[in-house]
Image (cartoon, rainbow, N blue to C red):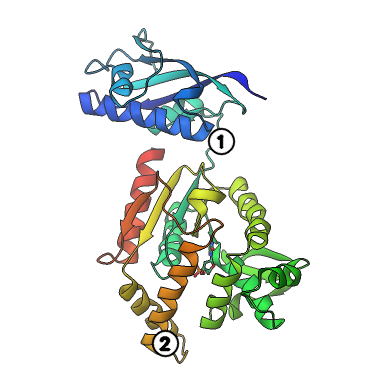
């Protein structure tokens, strides 16, 4: 039911025109996004700024950024020990949900009562290096890593084992109705448990890759795996890698990245990975698989591979996995500072 809510938020900024402009627009963008509102829901917005922020007005900044709602900014009295360089906001809006406050950068210190659990969505096509990057980020930030592709792979494996035609959505649904897939972490390493058995060692073959891509287009499969992914993300800070994390699974993720690379480079990396594991494959076959999976994953009707509008795109053609991980961790730590 729609009700009137007051949503609070704050961010710290440099005292420059650009500093205040960027901070105010970002704060409002994040607050709108997290609360699922737009200007159409908003009754009015009041900003306050600490006395040291004199270079520009946050209300003017968001007006110039195109927000067409009643706005005002006022100066706060200076209070000993308060956070310096701080923009606060109160948004009054009509919403179906309870208010979700947004405190960014140094302003997080104002609300230590708010949970510091956050989620990083890392989407992109197969072979872009998502899992290597996500593992490195998780280890640097000491957060949980969830490789969501492993869930689809486990269900693809079940269909293959049962001899089900993975192109037949109804047959896939029938085969997977009673399938139980869960994630366990053993010594910090993710294991996929299918009907009580750890199948982590069986899901990385080219056959399972194609089966996973096919079953991932079946709406029943996506629905079945949605709850598992969201449960893991709600209990601790996480990085999830997949295709639809920023768009469908966690549209409110605090951080979103979209990792790309050309098909040739992705195929070369996959080929090296498979041959290093002793699998006998040809580069041409791996390349064909990459192109086919790209097509399947991005043209399917439900939750296709797509960059979320607010995701930061990183092309890894000329970057190592460590360099990409550094870009992501820098971005997150700067924001959480
Ligand atoms: O990331 P991966 O290659 O392990 O994923 C296997 C397949 O599962 C991939 O072709 C697409 C699908 N998938 C998906 O549709 N959504 C996800 N979040 C993760 C994977």
Q: Quadrant of residue 132?
A: bottom left
| Residues packed near mark 1 inside 10 Å, few (<14), some (14 to 19) or many (20 plus) | few
Q: Quadrant of the C terminus?
A: top left
Q: Residue at x 49, y 65 (%)?
A: 297
In the rendered image, residue 85, in percent from the top left (x then y), is placed at 31, 22
Answer above or below: position of 254 versus 213. above
Tell me the SS state at disc 1.
loop
Q: Residue at x 43, y 19 (%)?
A: 89
| Residues packed near mark 2 inside 10 Å, few (<14), some (14 to 19) or many (20 plus) | few
Answer above or below: position of 31 versus 192. above
Tell me the SS state at disc 2.
helix
Q: Residue furthest top?
A: 77
Q: Residue at x 52, y 38 (%)?
A: 116
**Residue at numbered disc 2:** 275
Q: Which mark is residue 115?
A: 1
In the rendered image, residue 161, in percent from the top left (x then y), is placed at 69, 82
Residue 16 seen: no
The foreground one among 84 and 153 is: 153
Q: Residue furthest right?
A: 178
């Amino acid at each position: 039911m729609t009700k009137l809510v007051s949503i609070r938020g704050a961010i710290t900024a440099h005292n420059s025109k650009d500093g205040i402009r960027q901070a105010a627009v970002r704060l409002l963008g994040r607050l709108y996004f997290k609360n699922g509102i737009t200007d159409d829901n908003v009754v009015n917005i009041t900003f306050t700024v600490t006395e040291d922020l004199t270079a520009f007005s946050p209300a003017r900044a968001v007006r110039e950024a195109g927000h067409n709602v009643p706005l005002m900014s006022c100066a706060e009295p200076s209070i000993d020990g308060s956070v310096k360089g701080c923009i606060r906001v109160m948004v009054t809006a009509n919403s179906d949900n309870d208010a979700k406050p947004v405190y960014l950068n140094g302003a997080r210190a104002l609300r230590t009562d708010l949970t510091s659990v956050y989620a990083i969505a890392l989407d992109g096509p197969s072979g872009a290096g998502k899992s290597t990057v996500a593992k490195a980020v998780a280890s640097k930030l000491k957060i949980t890593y969830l490789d969501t592709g492993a869930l689809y792979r486990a269900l693809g494996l079940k269909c293959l084992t049962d001899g089900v035609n993975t192109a037949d959505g109804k047959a896939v649904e029938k085969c997977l109705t009673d399938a139980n897939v869960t994630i366990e972490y053993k010594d910090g390493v993710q294991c996929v448990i299918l009907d009580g058995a750890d199948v982590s060692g069986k899901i990385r073959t080219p056959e399972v890759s194609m089966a996973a891509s096919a079953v991932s287009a079946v709406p029943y499969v996506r629905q079945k795996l949605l709850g598992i992914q969201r449960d893991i993300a709600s209990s601790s800070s996480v990085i999830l890698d997949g295709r639809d994390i920023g768009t469908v699974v966690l549209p409110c993720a605090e951080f979103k990245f979209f990792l790309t690379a050309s098909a040739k480079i992705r195929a070369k990396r996959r080929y090296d990975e498979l041959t290093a594991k002793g699998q006998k494959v040809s580069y041409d076959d791996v390349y064909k698989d990459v192109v086919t999976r790209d097509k399947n994953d991005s043209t399917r009707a439900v939750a296709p591979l797509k960059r979320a509008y607010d995701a930061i795109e990183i092309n890894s053609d000329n970057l190592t996995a460590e360099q990409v991980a550094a870009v992501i961790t820098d971005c997150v730590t700067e924001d959480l500072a």
